[in-house]
Every structure is written in structure tokens, then in C-alpha cells.
Image (spheres, coloured by chain):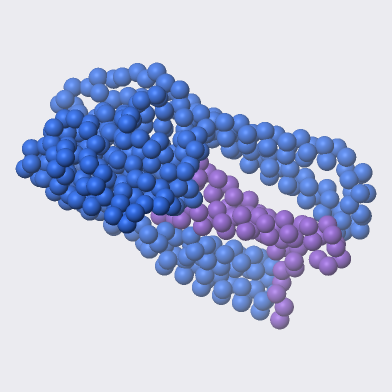
Chain colours: A purple, B blue
Amino acid sequence: MQFPLSISDITLWIAVTAMILLITSELLTSYSEQFGDFPIDKTRLRLVALILGASFMATVLLRAITPSII
Amino acid sequence: MTTLSDQKLWRLGTAKAIRILQLLFLSIALWFIYWSHIYELTYWNKTLLESFQSNFPNVLVYSILIIAVIYLESQSKRHRRISMVPSSVKTREISMSTSSVKSLEMLQKENEQLKHELMKSKKIPSNKIGIALVIVGALLLFASVRTSSTILAFIGLGLTFWGALFLFARSTKFVRIPILDATAISSYITLDRIIDDLNYKGKPIYIPPYPKETYLPEYLEGLKEMVVFISAKDSTTMPNIEEMAKKRFLVKNPKGICISPPGSGLASLFEKELRADFTKIDQESFYDGLPRVIVNNLELASDFTIEAGKELIHVKITNSFYSNLYSKNQNLKSVHSIGCPLTSAVTCALAKTTGKRVTISKTKLSPDLKTVEIWYQLLEG
């Protein structure tokens, strides 16, 4: 039994998810009045989006520095 | 009477367009970087320099895109600054008859009630959704390992992540607006009773406190607290320092009462969010930071503009949480003179920043109570 996804696949997934979350959090912060009744902590959502974005950038850097690792 | 601002609508549209453009450019630039460098570095074993040399047009494209994103960011910041400290915007006013205003208010109330009923019937707690997603995601991940299926792994990973996100990002302190109103009303009713009973005519004056770090003798420590003085007569004479320092409610010279402002707690929260002491902050940072804290951080209103004049400071609040307190049905007198918790907090902040006594000179409400305009007066001496 082996996990079917490689690191490259996960990197790609992180990139896509980070983009979706960053876009969502950006739109939520700019137009708070449109989401007035939406019970979600925008600060936390933005934090998760930034963490995912940073982790994607970290994997990209890792690839640039040592391509053989990943 | 109601006021509409065309300029605001235009500004919202431009800001939205700038944001979408920024995100679009950034996404394209990221994909350019990914496919032109990372792909080649990984699969073609090229060095970073070789990749740069062979992809010069791509480098040019994404550099331009990133420069465009930075430029747009500076533009959007400019827009935000303009919206925070606006120039006098010409507004057109629509006159409405009193009967139509009443019917509008009734309709809005009915609308609110229906909304609440709908919410109650449709309410599914977000934590249940989160837990369900996590469980399904975990099961799919397990199945993907058993069957070595990439598709199942992607779905499982996605569901687990979104479930965890729902649990993490759900609002833990969600309070409905009517609850806020209900908790605030009683203190205003009490204040109305006191003022009516004592037959005091003076305007409430917010007296700035001494900075917390300032050394004061023990018997004057009370001067470090923000107070509102309501005089018996319509005068702006300051109460005796010793009486204020003793934290007395009834003041004899001049005759009046000293109370704690309804927004003092909220003003402290503003300081915490801004990470600044209002007694030390410079006025530019204050006028720039306060709207951000009220609209973005604490989300107490959907829009907040502040315009400083020499003596009068004009504040416009849209969709305030406390706007229902101004409703005629509540029949609260003191809320107009001393301000709702939000306007009172702004008054406290102004008094602390300027170091001057502040009064609420005039309050103007739109018929639907969505917009509250306040003119604050700074008193010298």
C-alpha cells in the first residue's frame, strides 16, 4: 500500500487551493458588506490562504535550489 | 430625507476591477514562472541561468505582469485612502413624505423578521458540515491508498482540507444584531430617566483623560479615566478637577453629572486593534487607521468616512450595528446627544487623540437608518 500522490502532485494541488483561497479572502476583505451574514472568520481564512501560498512558494524554491530532491 | 452618493458606487466598481485585474495578472505570472523555470529545472535538468536565457520572452512577460500588480496595488491603496478621508462629496437628496418613511420602516422590520425566520429554518451549523467533510475525505484517502487511485486521493485530500478549513475558519463569536441592541438599550433608558429626573439641559461633553503613563498623585489618579460631563445648564464650563478625580457621579461646581461614556470599552478595543495609544498617536495615522479598524477589523459598519475640519469633524457611518438605537420606536433621547456605543467610541478616540473636549454637535439620520452622519465639535480650553 502506497499513497498514490507524488510531491509534485501535492505541490500542484497546494498551488490551485492557495489561489482559490487567496482570491476568496481578497474578495471577502474588500467587500465585507456583501458577506455580512456569512458566519466565517475572514482573518483565519486569509491566514490559511497565506500559509498555503507560502508553502507553495517554499516547494517552488526547493525545486529551484535542489531539483533532485523532489 | 435620504442621501445617495454616486461617487461611492463608482469607487466600489473601480476597486473591484483593480482587485480582479491584480489577481488575474498574478495568477498568469505565477503559471509563467512555474512552467518556464520549475518544469525545466525539474524535468530537463537545466540550471536556473540556462532557464532564464532560454525563456527570455517569458521572463519579460511575467516581470511586466508583476510590475503591473505592484502598480495596481499602489492605485488601490490610493483609492482606499481617498475613501477614508474624502473631500466634500456633493450628494443629491431625495425627499420622501413622512407616510412613505413610516411604511418603509414597517416593511424593513417585516423583512428583518422574515430573514430571521428563514435563517432559523435553514440553519445548519458549519461545524457539522466540517466534520462530515473531514470524515468523508479521510475515508476517500484511505480508499485511495487501498486502490492506488490518484483521483480518489485528490478528492479525499480536497474534502479533508475543506472540512478542516470549515472547522478552523467558522465564526466562533457570532452575535446577532438584535441581541446587541437589546443589551445596549437599558443603559440608555436609565440615562434618559436620570437626565429627565434631574432636568439637566447641558450637552454631554467628553473630557479627555490623562495618558496612562503620566505620573499623577494618588488622589488625582481618577483623571486617567475618560468621562462625559452633562451640565445642569447649557454651558461648556469644565467641572472641578478634584471632583472629577474623586470619580463622583454628582458634580457640584458647576452642577452636573459625570458618567462613563457608553463607548469607552469599544474605544479601548480600537486601541488594541490599532496597537496604539490614542493619547500618543499622530492625527494622520489616527484618521487613516480608525476607518480600517471599524470596517475591516471589527466589522462594526460597512463604510466609515471621517473628514477633519478646524473645529468640526464630520463622520459618516453606513450600516452601523447600532443604527437601530436611533429608531423612533426606541424613543431614546440620550442616544442622540451622547451617541450610540460606536459614535461614543469615536468621540472618546477623538478626545484622546486631540486632547480637547469633544461634543456631538449634530446628528443626521437617513430615513432607513442605514446612514448616520455626525458632526463633532472640538472645544478649546
Residue B301 seen anywhere in this rendered image of the structure: no
Residue A52 visible (yes or no) = yes
The residue at the point 44 percent across, 55 percent down is: A40
Q: Residue at x 48, y 60 (%)?
A: B169
Which corner quadrant holds the C terminus of chain B? top left
Residue B125 location (% of width, % of height)? 38, 63
For the point 56% across and 75% down, the residue is B139
Question: Residue B84 appears at what percent x and percent y?
Answer: 47, 33
Is residue B186 left or right of B355 when viewed as pictured? left
Taking B84 as reference, is B176 above or below it?
A: below
Q: Is residue B145 above or below residue B192?
A: below
**From the viewer's perspective, is B360 left or right of A15?**
left
Instruction: Give whichever of B160, B304 is nearer the camera.
Output: B304
Position of the N terminus of chain B by quadrant: top left
Q: Residue A42: percent from the left, percent from the top?
A: 48, 52
Q: Where B259 falls versus B103 (above or below)?
A: below
Rendering quarter of residue B201: top left
Observer-nearest of B5 and B325: B325
Residue drawn at x 63%, y 34% as measured from the top left:
B74
**Image quadrant assignment for residue B303:** top left
In this orientation, which residue lies closer to the viewer: B116 or B10? B10
